[in-house]
Image (tube, helix red, strand yellow):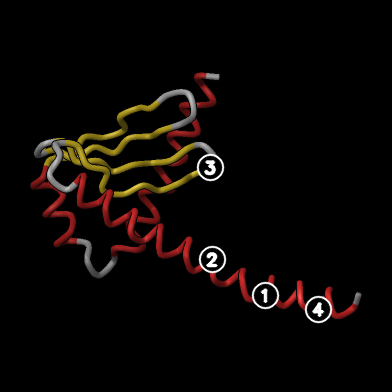
Amino acid sequence: MQEQLFINALKLLLALPVVILLAYISLRFTNQYLYRQNKHKNIQVIERIPIQNKVCLCLIKMGEEYMVIGISENNFQILKTIKKEEIKNWKVQNKEVEYLNLKKTFHTKIKEYKKRNRKND
């Protein structure tokens, strides 16, 4: 009985890393496929930041404009529209302090979004 338990535990310890490795590889290939598929479309999701369990902020590119949108379980809202030139200027100006500015911007946007949701409820 002890031998059988030991053999089953050993099988589990050997199979688990294999399953995790296969899941990792399949996710990597799937992401590459989806990225290539969306690369030449008119609407692209550039970045997605989860805020809460079912709430996120997304930076999307639509044509030559970028939009920051808030997405929740029930709705979505355009928070800001940004021109392509503004994105280029923003990238050049904020390289050295990118982390701090991004953190402040998202915190203020999150607070604004939460205030709007409280008013709507």
Q: Which of marks 2 and 3 is nearer the N terminus?
A: 2
Q: Is mark 1 on a helix, strand or loop?
A: helix
Local crowd at mark 1 within 10 Å, few (<14), some, or many (≥20)? few
Numbered disc in front, either 2 or 3: 2
Residue at label 2?
A: 20
Image spot of residue 99 (x, y percent): 34, 63
Marks 1 and 2 sit apart, C-alpha to C-alpha, by 11 Å
Marks 4 and 1 sit apart, C-alpha to C-alpha, by 11 Å
Residue at label 4?
A: 6
Residue at the right extreme? 1
Side (left or right) of 111 relative to 4:
left
The three-letter code of the residue at mark 2 reads Ile
Q: Which of 35 and 73 is in front in this view?
A: 35
Local crowd at mark 2 within 10 Å, few (<14), some, or many (≥20)? few
The three-letter code of the residue at mark 4 reads Phe
Side (left or right) of 58 relative to 53:
left
Q: Tell me the number on the disc at residue 13.
A: 1
**Location of residue 40 by image quarter:** top left
